[in-house]
Structure formats: C-alpha cells, structure tokens
C-alpha cells in the first residue's frame, strides 16, 4: 500500500537527494555557527486551562484570543511561538467541534456520520485563523479542522469510510473520556490509497483500526491506572502514522516516551497545549509511556542547545549514538543517518518493507529506515541498485528535504517570493531549484546561520547540527 502522503513526496524529494550526490563534495572550511538562529521551542506560556473551559464555538474563539493577546510583540514574530499558538488554536477547535458517540464497539468515521461535527470544525478553523491574525499572529501554516468524537467504550474499532475523503475534515480525533483517558488522531488524507475505490471495482472501501484499553498498574500514591492502549492495524501495519495521546499524570513529561510492549520507542512529543504525550505510531502493539534516559559522554564541549536536542531526540529513538556511549557530534552526517533521523521523527518506519539496494542488507543499521524511505518515495539511490549511505549529504539537500516536510507533511506555506526572500537573508546565492524549500526552512528558524552571512549550500553538516535542526522540526510536528 502507498499512502497519499507518499505520493506527495515523489514530485520533488527524490530529486533533492539525487542532485549533486554522484560526486564527492569538497566543502569549504566551515564558518562559525550561530546557534541563536535556531529556535526549537517557544517562550510564550500556553494556557491549557483555557482549553478545559471550552463549551462551544464562542468560548473556543475566546480562548484563542486570550492566548494570542497574552503574547508579546517579539513572541508574535518568533516562528516557534507562532507554531505554539497555531497548535493551541487546533486544540481549541478540537475541544469545541466534538460529539459524544453512543459508546458502541464500532465507531464509524464517514461523511454521513460526521457531517455535523465536520461542518462545525471547518467553520471554527477559519474563525480560529482569523482570530490569530486579528491579534497580530500571522499564521505560517493551515490551522487544521479537527473533528472530535468522544466515547467511554473501553474497546472499539474505528471504521473509516472512503467518503470521508470528500469532506473538509483535516483530522479526526477519537477521544476516550473515562479513565484512563487517551485519544487517537489521524488525517484521513493519509489513507487515500487504501480508501479510494479501485476504478475497476467501484465498491466503497473501508479501513479498520482496533483500539483497546489494557489496564496497567496504578501510579505510585494514586488510584489512577497507567494507560496501556492496544492498537490493531490491518496486517499489523498502517501505511501512515496515527497519533496516540496519553496523559503523563504526575510524571515529568520531558523524561517520558511512549513505548510498545515489544520494546520499540515511538517518536513522542509533549504537547503543552493539551498536556499530553503525543506519539506517532503505525504498528500493531500495546503502547504505554515509560522513562527513558539518554546520555552521551562526548557532548560536553558542544553548545547547550545541541546537547539538549541530541538527548531529547535520543530519548524518543530519533537519533542514536555508538556502542562506546558517544554521539560523535562533529562527525559529518551521512545519507543513511539523515534518512534514518527523518523517517524516525516522522514515525514512518515500516519494518515489513524490503530494501531494493545491494549495499543495504538486513545487517545494515538503518535497513528499515532506508527501505521505508524508498518505498514511500522519499529517496532514490545513486543508481537502481546502490544507495551509498556512507556518503555525506550537502546542506542544500538537507534543507530542501526539511522544507518539503514542513510544506507537505505539516501544511506550512513558503514565502511568496522565495528568491527575493533568500537574497535578503544570505550574502551568497542559493540554488534556484531549492528556493521555495530553503526559504521556508529559513523563515521557520531551522537554518543554522554562519557568521559570514552566507548559506554555503555545498557544505556538509555534522551530526550535532543536524540533530539540532531535526529537533526544531520535531517541536513543530502536529
């Protein structure tokens, strides 16, 4: 199966990893890096208590307005803070555009069954974006229309009908409202290939996802059970990730990651608006949260932001170190490593896929990530049978791919005149074919600056710097 998400990548990301890679690069001497240019986390306070008071559309708009009006002028210009405000707005829409189900064991997600709540979510989405603009927050991406269905059933099957693709729903959320609480969120468009009728067989198609609560032990000193959620996907694997949101309870969320019973750690991010641990996953398993520490012995000399990024991403299994407990942050990042980081942060690693490359065997440390990236159209090889994962990847190629992730996976809009925008940002020229993506990554604060004022697109990047920009991307995942 290939998802609609996979098709989007084919139109350009393959080229980004192919162009200029056939020859080894000889990068110029690196300039001094300016890490202050990379803003991974916002400074504005998110008032989650505003969300709990939402009773309908008007109170949702009021909450968004209060949140935005509490931001300073500097925060309203900071990409990370704008992203936080957009995330808050989406949570407000989800809190108001909701309906209680009949708690039946089957929850049907279709155009007819959800018409009322989808219409409400779409209208609220537009009002939310306008409210942010009226308060001086210029949205950099589309605010999603999140339609929410609430249930108290301890076990249920989500049946997604093909006609949901014809509606205005950006995301669907199924929220269990009894303890232990959790929610499942997904984008119907991600499953377009599975749901669209075959031209030779016009019969409607469906996709079913099983969800079951498995009670765990109670948190120490409380009567609140730690949530365990069993996900059952068709044939054990979904073609695109869904988001499982768990309440961390009294635990410190920065030390937690959602893990499966089979020992896999999902790409987990703490959502300060909903105060949940949001994990992107696509495989059948039982999931819960647990503490996972990450420490590397050779990060002491690097900037504090780099250390924070590496350790945070290592806790959620996005980046990895070596057997001697080092990360080797000054080592140039390779094609294989970069692909692995990107696929893990997106939650797109399908362990059932096979690599087409002779030099990527099952013994390769990034086998599943490379196989998944190829299958979903994210990368190509040097030729039909070789990937050459040990070779370095240039700065231009890295930021082109990140820009496309921002636009196609996360709904960000590139600057209207990217060439002129880049000319005002850098003293040297940026490859014209990469203008839209690099302009977008620059505007969103993901580009590590050089003290020379240049972009230096032919340079390679080291593992520490790449971890920092991947962390910035990770913080914006919704």
Image: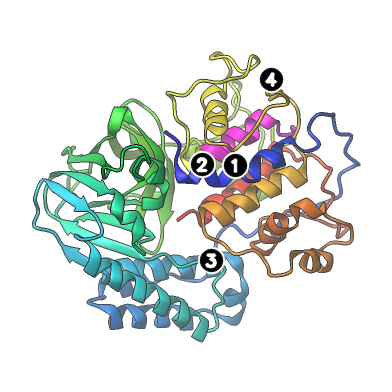
- The Cα–Cα distance between marks 1 and 2, rounded to whole angstroms, is 7 Å
Q: Nearer the viewer, residue 270 or 18?
A: 18
Q: Nearer the viewer, residue 423 or 34?
A: 423
As drawn, 428 above or below 205: below
Residue 130 in magenta stretch: no
The majority secondary structure of the magenta stretch comes to: helix
Q: Quadrant of the N terminus?
A: top left
As drawn, 470 above or below 388: below
| First reached walking from the N terminus: tag 1 or tag 3 | 1
Q: Crowding at label 4, few (<14), some or many (≥20) Cα neighbours within 10 Å?
A: some
Identify the residue position indicated by label 3 in the image: 141
- The Cα–Cα distance between marks 3 and 4, rounded to whole angstroms, is 37 Å
Identify the residue position indicated by label 4 in the image: 386
Q: Crowding at label 3, few (<14), some or many (≥20) Cα neighbours within 10 Å?
A: some
Residue span colored magenta:
331-343
> Residue at (55%, 60%) from the top-left corner?
41
Residue 252: tell me if it is visible: no
């Amino acid at each position: 199966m290939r998802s609609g998400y996979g098709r989007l990548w084919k139109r350009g990301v393959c080229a980004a990893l192919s162009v200029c890679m056939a020859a080894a690069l000889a990068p110029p001497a690196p300039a001094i890096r300016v890490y202050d240019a990379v803003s991974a986390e916002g400074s504005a306070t998110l008032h989650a208590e505003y969300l709990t008071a939402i009773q309908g559309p008007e109170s949702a708009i009021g909450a968004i307005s209060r949140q935005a009006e509490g931001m300073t002028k500097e925060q309203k210009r900071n990409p990370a803070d704008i992203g936080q405000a957009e995330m808050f707005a989406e949570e407000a829409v989800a809190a108001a555009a909701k309906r209680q189900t009949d708690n039946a064991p089957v929850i049907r997600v279709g155009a007819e069954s959800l018409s009322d709540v989808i219409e409400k979510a779409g209208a609220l989405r537009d009002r939310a974006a306008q409210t942010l603009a009226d308060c001086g927050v210029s949205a950099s991406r589309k605010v999603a229309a999140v339609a929410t269905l609430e249930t108290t059933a301890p076990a249920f099957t989500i049946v997604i009908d093909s006609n949901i693709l014809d509606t205005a729903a950006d995301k669907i959320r199924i929220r269990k409202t009894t303890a232990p609480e959790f929610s499942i969120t997904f984008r119907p468009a991600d499953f377009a290939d599975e749901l669209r009728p075959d031209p030779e067989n016009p019969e409607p198609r469906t996709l079913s996802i099983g969800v079951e609560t498995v009670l765990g032990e109670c948190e120490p000193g409380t009567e609140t059970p730690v949530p365990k959620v069993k996900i059952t996907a068709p044939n054990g694997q979904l073609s695109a990730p869904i988001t499982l949101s768990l309440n961390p309870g009294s635990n410190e969320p920065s030390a937690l990651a959602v893990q499966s019973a089979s020992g896999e750690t999902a790409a987990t991010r703490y959502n300060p608006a909903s105060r949940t641990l949001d994990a992107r996953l696509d495989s059948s398993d039982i999931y819960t949260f647990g503490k996972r520490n990450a420490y590397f012995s050779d990060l002491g000399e690097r900037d504090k932001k780099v250390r924070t990024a590496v350790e945070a991403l290592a806790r959620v299994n996005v980046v990895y170190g070596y057997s001697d407990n080092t990360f080797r942050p000054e080592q140039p990042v390779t094609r294989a490593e970069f692909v692995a980081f990107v696929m893990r942060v997106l939650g797109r690693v399908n362990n059932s896929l096979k690599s087409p490359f002779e030099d990527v065997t099952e013994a390769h440390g990034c086998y599943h990530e490379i196989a998944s990236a190829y299958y979903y159209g994210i990368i190509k090889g040097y030729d039909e049978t070789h990937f050459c994962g040990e070779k370095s990847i240039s700065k231009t190629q890295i930021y082109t791919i990140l820009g496309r992730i921002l636009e196609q996976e996360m709904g960000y809009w590139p600057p209207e005149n990217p060439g002129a925008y880049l000319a005002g940002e850098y003293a040297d020229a940026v490859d014209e074919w990469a203008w839209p993506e690099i302009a977008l990554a620059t505007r969103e604060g993901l580009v590590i600056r050089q003290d020379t004022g240049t972009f230096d697109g032919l340079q390679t990047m080291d593992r520490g710097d790449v971890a920092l920009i991947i962390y910035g991307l990770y913080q914006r995942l919704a």
